[in-house]
Image (cartoon, helix red, strand yellow):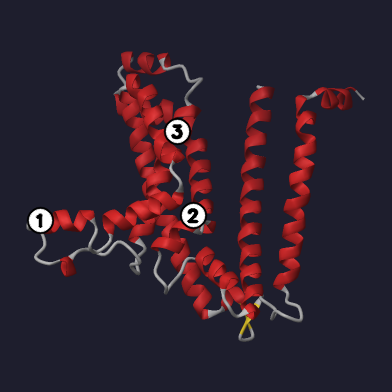
Amino acid sequence: MNGLKNFLNKKILLIFPIIIFNGLFFFGSFISGVQSSFGNRFYENGWFIDGQLILLNDSIMKNLSFTIKIAFITTLISLSIGIVGIYIIYQYPLIKQNLKKLLYLPLLTPYLLIAFFMMYAFSTSGLLNRILYALGFIDSLKQAPIFINDLNGRGIILAYIWKTAPFIILVLINSLENFDFRLIKIAESLGNSKFQSFIHILWPQIKNSFLYAGIIVFTFIFSSVEIPLVLGPTRPQMISHWAYQNFQNGDIIYRSRSFAMGTIILILNIIITVMIGYQLLGQVTYEKNN
């Protein structure tokens, strides 16, 4: 009974109406999408393409491989930038507050605006290549490196790094808000180098946040559609781009394929979210008990 009373006294009850309201729309849409993915009198069964399960289809496998490659490379680069950024902050802690304000700027920039800026700056006749041509680095715009709609997805990777690298740095900064930096000074007074102090004292404080931020970034890129839609190639496509195009296709029979792929992406996101939430809850419980 005491546990129930404590639960009822919590302020979380104040937001229950909006949680229920949004939950009804979410689960209603989810159930409707799953139902439509199996087809009806207008749609084919979207879980099978030419008799093959959707994830085993050759074209889908190429798109899936392309999506995983883009998400993995972007996440790896963003994590590398994040760890370098937090190391610089560790070396010069006075820049932290000003850097935090600067890092919020790309986070507040809409993805479509970033995509159009990328097209303006990095297209074949874009600003960067015109500068390279004017400086004599290339003899013709035909020799310019291709970043937009290229088969390696370099434009997509650059656009995502713009947003995800600052996000990771901010997550790592926030994970150190309650960290006592006097421990580092004590370690250095005992003979530790700055790098040793970073590895043995600071890294254990940020490694979980580092891992979770990487998982969040990978999952987000895997399911995001705006950047691939504007900057991605027509073949292969990222999975989210493929699903969106099938939904928008004039031939309505392809729509169930979009619902099937959307269901797969959503289930993947839910599983990863639950796993992260479970791990975080376990850490909070462990810290309270100790």
Please give left or right for residue 54 compared with residue 123 in the image: right
Viewer-proximal residue among 85 and 99: 99
Vertically, is 74 above or below 123? Answer: above
Q: Earlier in the sequence, mark 2 or mark 3?
A: 3
Viewer-proximal residue among 46 and 60: 46
Q: Which residue is most to the right?
A: 1
Amino acid type of disc 3? Answer: Leu
Query: Of helix, strand and loop, which one carries label 3?
Result: helix
Please give left or right for residue 73 compared with residue 12 in the image: left
Q: Position of residue 46 (x, y in %)?
A: 66, 76
Using the numbered discs, state the Cα–Cα distance from disc 2 to disc 3 in whole angstroms: 18 Å
Vertically, is 186 above or below 87? Answer: above
Amino acid type of disc 1? Answer: Ala
Q: Earlier in the sequence, mark 1 or mark 3?
A: 1
| Numbered label attached to residue 134 | 1
Residue shown at 65% from the left, 69% from the top: 260
Vertically, is 125 above or below 62? Answer: above
Q: Dot 2: within a 10 Å radius of its alpha carbon, few (fewer than 14), some, or many (20 or more) residues?
A: many
Quadrant location of the C terminus? top right
Residue shown at 73% from the left, 77% from the top: 39
Disc 2 marks which residue? 221
Residue shown at 57% from the left, 70% from the top: 248
Quadrant in the picture for residue 197: top left
Can see residue 76?
A: no
Quadrant location of the N terminus? top right
| Numbered label attached to residue 170 | 3
Query: Of helix, strand and loop, which one carries label 2?
Result: helix
Q: Which residue is most to the left?
A: 136
